[in-house]
Structures are given as structure tokens and as C-alpha cells.
Image (tube, rainbow, N blue to C red):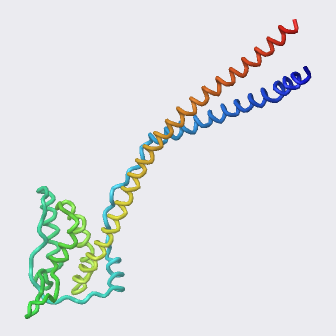
Amino acid sequence: MSDRSALDSLEEGFVFRVSRFFFLFLIVLLMLTVLGGAAFFVWGFLPPTPPTGAAEISVTAKDVQQYLASNPIEPPTAPSSELVPGATSSTDDQTTYEALADSLRQLLPADVYPWDEVYSESYELKERGINNYLRELMEPYNETSEMIAPLRSLIGVLAAFEGEQRLLSLKAFVKLYRERYAAQTEAAQSAQSEFENSQSEKMIASTTGGMIVVSAITGMAFTAMFLVLLSVQRNIKKLVEKQSKE
């Protein structure tokens, strides 16, 4: 009888209390898990910030002067004439482009500056023409509307120079512009890649968060059932002991 009372005391004083504490602690933990999973789920549905549009590339006369100071370019030779071919565009864009082209011709007159390639008597290329540099400058663009900004920027830079420095500045401008265009394109591709990765992460987060919430709620339900059963067991035990004493 003493052994049984000792077991009863152990069960009453330790097992039930520890079990109750354990299941209550487990429920609190599961509730926190539900909150965390819900936050993860909601975060997954928030749209990621899309990459911003590319800013207009800027090359100033000061940039060209600094480039020429550290990267000397061989001076040009003889003259000739013609301009970069246009692309598909609206009438207004084409008109604007032609007006800018006229301004460029005035800054680089064909009787002074070489617009076409210059060859030696043995037909070796001595000098690339202005048209070659303009084609290189406009190579990334398909529409005349896209060519207007770099052409306008080029004219603004060339107007700050005189004489043969004007053609040297043209070469430096094209070099700097293409370098900055390449850097901007790389940055845009990197931003787009990060945006797509963020979209994938958020999709996974919303799915994972939903699964965590469902699993935690299910765990809470089963834990609550265990607590109820534990409480029922204790009450039945007390009722039986009370009836046996009577």
C-alpha cells in the first residue's frame, strides 16, 4: 500500500505537473511559431521592389578633357562626308535627329574633318571617319528616338573644344560613352537578376510560411487534446479515490 501511495504521490506531485508544464510550454512555442510563420507568409506576398529605369548616360566636356589628358589619342588626317544612317522612328524624332545632325556637321565640317575612312595609296586604313565613330556610338540603339540623347550630349561636348581637339574629343566621347553604357547595362542586368531572385524567394517564403502556420496550428490542436486528456485523467483519478473512500 505504501508503494502505491508513493507512486501516486510521484504521479500527482511530479508527473502531472511536469506533463502539464511541458504541454503548456509546447503550446506557447507553437503559438510563437504560428506568428512567425504568418509573418513569413505575409512577407512572401509583399511584391519586391522592381529595378529602376536606366538613367540617361552623361559624358561632360570635363570628362573628355580628363580622358584626353590621361589617354592621348593620335591626331586625325584628311577629310570627306556623310552621317550615321537613321533607324525606324516617328516624324518628330527624325526631324529632331536631322536638326542635331546638321549641328554636328557645322561643328565638324566635311572640308576639315574626315567623315569617311582615310586610306593610304596602298589601301591601308590610315584614319577612321566620323561616320565610323557615330555608328559605334549608336550601335546599342535601334530607334532614332534613342539616338537623340547621346547625339545632343555629343554636340554639347564638342562645342567646348576647338580645332583638331574637336575630333579627338569625339573619339574620347565615344569611348567614354560606350564604357558607361556597358557598365549601366551590366548594372541593370544585375538588378533584374536580383529582382527575379527576390520574387522566387518570396514565393518560397509564402509557401513555407503557410506550411509552418498549418503545421503549428495542427500541433497546437493535438497538444490541447493531450492537455484535456491529462486533465480528464486527473479528475477521473480524484473521483475514483473519493468514491473509494466513501
Location of the N terminus by quadrant is: top right
> Does residue 116 lie above or below 85 as drawn?
below
Q: Is residue 222 or residue 200 the one in the foreground?
A: 222
Location of the C terminus by quadrant is: top right
Q: How many marks?
A: 0
Quadrant in the picture for residue 102: bottom left
- Residue lying at 31% horizontally and 88% vertically, measured from the top left: 72
Q: Position of residue 4 (x, y in %)?
A: 87, 22
Going by the image, does 181 lie left or right of 226? left
Q: Is residue 229 or residue 168 the one in the foreground?
A: 229
Quadrant in the picture for residue 17: top right
Q: Position of residue 35 (x, y in %)?
A: 58, 36
Going by the image, does 228 lie left or right of 75? right
Q: Is residue 219 or residue 11 the one in the foreground?
A: 11
- Residue lying at 25% horizontally and 85% vertically, measured from the top left: 165
- Residue lying at 69% horizontally and 20% vertically, measured from the top left: 229
Going by the image, does 7 lie left or right of 141? right
Q: Position of residue 98 (x, y in %)?
A: 13, 66
> Does residue 240 lie above or below 81 as drawn?
above
Going by the image, does 82 lie left or right of 229? left
Q: Position of residue 101 (x, y in %)?
A: 15, 70
Q: Is residue 64 or residue 99 the one in the foreground?
A: 64
- Residue lying at 54% horizontally and 38% vertically, measured from the top left: 37
